[in-house]
Image (spheres, rainbow, N blue to C red):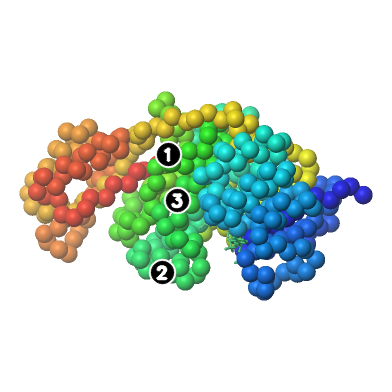
Amino acid sequence: MPEPLRLGVAGLGTVGIGTVKIVQQHAALIQRRTGRPIVITAVSARNRTKNRDADLSCYAWEDDPVALARRDDIDVFVELMGGADGSALDATRAAIATGKDVVTANKAMLALHGQALAEAAEAKGHVIRFEAAVAGGIPVVKALTEGLAGNDIRRVMGVMNGTCNYILTRMESAGLPYAEVFEEARQLGYLEADPNLDVGGIDAGHKLSLLAAIAFGTRVSFDAVRLEGIGRVSIDDIRRAADMGYRIKLLGVAQMTGRGLEQRMTPCLVPADSPLGQLQGGTNMVVIEGDSVGQIVLRGAGAGAGPTASAVMSDVIEIARGSRIPTFGQPATDLVEAVPAGTSAPAPHYLRLELADKPGALAKVATVLGEEGVSIDRMRQYAHADATVAPVLIVTHKTARDAIDHALSRLPATGVLIGEPVAIRIESV
Ligand code: NAP
Ligand code: HSE
C-alpha cells in the first residue's frame, strides 16, 4: 500500500469544509488518480464546538494553527483561514520551517508575502501552491504555469471579483443605483468582512498581482497595481455605456510594455458583445494572450465552497503525484524586480460631461480637448428635462490617461462644466 499524503487543514469555514467534503467523498476516485490515498490527519479553527456540517470526529484537533502546521504527522499544510498577516502567515511560516508543503487559497497573504514565503519554501525544497487564491474554481494558475508555459505571455486580463461583477450586472439589469445593490450584496452575504476588499478592487488586485508574477517572471508587486474600485460607477454611466454598445466591468489587466510592467484593476468599458461584456453575475473570467496560443478565455465560478475547494484539491493532488512546480512557475530567486510602467498604454476613453446648455459650450470643451491632444471619435448629446443642463457623451480616439486627466482638470475654467466629469477607459478585448 503506498504511503498516504497527510493533510493538516487550518480553517473550517466555507472553503475548509468544502475541502474536507471532497477528501471524504472522493477518496477512492482521488486514489485512483494519484496512486496513493489522501487523508486528513488534523484540523484547526477558532471554535471547536461550532456545528460544521461535516464529520470531523476522526481528525485530531488543534486550537492553534501554528501547532497544527508543526505537527510531525502532516505532509501538507492546507491554509484556509484567510488574512494577509496574523495566524495565517505565522502558521504558513511554521509549516515551511518544519518541512511541509503548503496549499493556500489566501491571495492577500501571497500578494504581500508571497515572494518571501516562496523563497523560504524553495530553499528547503518545498512547494507552495495557490490555485484557489485566484478566480476560485477556474484553473488559471495551472493554465499559466503548465498549459501555457511554452508561450511568451503578452497580456493577462479578467474579471476576478465576483461580488463586483454581481453588483455591476445587477445595477444594469434592475436599473438600481450602486448603493442599493451594494446593500443587496451585503444581505446576500457576498461581501467580504471588509467590503472595501471587494468594491475597492483590492481583492481582485491581489489576484492580478499573483498572475502577473507567473506570466512575466517578476516578483509579486501588488503595490504597483493601479487600483480603482467600483464605488463611483453610476447607473447613468452603466446606461449610457450600454447605449454606446459597452458594459462596465472591474477589469484587471497586466501586460509587459516597453515602459515596464503595467498592472491595473479599474472600471473599464468593454464591448457588450465580447466574452467579458457578456459575463453576468458572480462569475469570473480570465483572458490570457500568448504568442503561440493566441487568446484563451477561462470562465467559471470565482468563489463558493465547491469551486474553491475543487481548486484546493487540484493542488493537493498535484503534490500527491509528486509534481514540484515552484510557486510562481520558476524559482523564486530568479524572479526579477518589475519596473512599473508609470502610465497606462493609450486607449479610447468614454467621457460623460454635464454642460451648461448654452451656445458655444460644446465648442469650448472641444477646444480644451483638442489643445490637450485628445481627439474625439464619437459624441452624443442626450435629450434632457432640465433646460439648463446638457448631458454629453464623448468617445475619444486612443489617448494617454494623463492627457485625459489634464484636459478634464481644465474644464471647470471654461465656465460651462456642471458637476464632476466622468472618464472611463475603453479596453480592447
Ligand atoms: P471563512 O468561511 O471565514 O472561514 C475561515 C475559517 O478560518 C473559519 O473556520 C475560522 O474558524 C478559521 N480561522 C480564522 N482565524 C483563525 C485562527 N486564528 N485560528 C484558527 N482558525 C481560524 O473563510 P473562507 O471563505 O472559507 O475563506 C478562506 C480562505 O479562502 C481565505 O483566504 C479566502 O480569501 C479564500 N477564498 C475564499 C473563497 C470563498 O468563496 N469563500 C474563494 C476564494 C478564496 P471558526 O470557524 O472557528 O471561526
Ligand atoms: N470576495 C471574492 C469575490 C471571493 O467576490 O470574488 C473570492 O475570492
- Local crowd at mark 1 within 10 Å, few (<14), some, or many (≥20)? some
Q: Earlier in the sequence, mark 2 or mark 1?
A: 2
- Foreground pick, 268 / 257: 257
Q: Is residue 251 above or below residue 167?
A: above
Alpha-carbon span between mark 2 and mark 1: 30 Å
Task: Name the secondary structure under disc 2.
Answer: helix
- Local crowd at mark 2 within 10 Å, few (<14), some, or many (≥20)? few
Q: Earlier in the sequence, mark 2 or mark 3?
A: 2
Relative horizontal placement of residue 394, taking residue 335 as reference (left or right):
left
Task: Name which residue lies at 42% across and 39% down.
Answer: 224
- Quadrant containing the C terminus is top left
Task: Name which residue lies at 23% across and 50% down.
Answer: 421
Q: Amino acid at mark 1?
A: Ala
Task: Name the secondary structure under disc 3.
Answer: helix
Q: Which residue is mark 2?
A: 183
- Residue 404: horizontal and vertical position, in percent? 25, 39
Task: Name the secondary structure under disc 1.
Answer: helix
Q: Which residue is mark 3?
A: 202
Alpha-carbon span between mark 1 and mark 3: 12 Å
> In the displayed image of the protein, which residue is found farthest to the top?
258
- Residue 290: horizontal and vertical position, in percent? 56, 32
- Foreground pick, 363 / 9: 9
Mark 2 C-beta closer than 8 Å to ligand 2: no
Quarter where residue 176 is shown? bottom left
Alpha-carbon span between mark 2 and mark 3: 19 Å
Q: Which residue is mark 1?
A: 224
Q: How many dots with numbers? A: 3
Q: Earlier in the sequence, mark 1 or mark 3?
A: 3
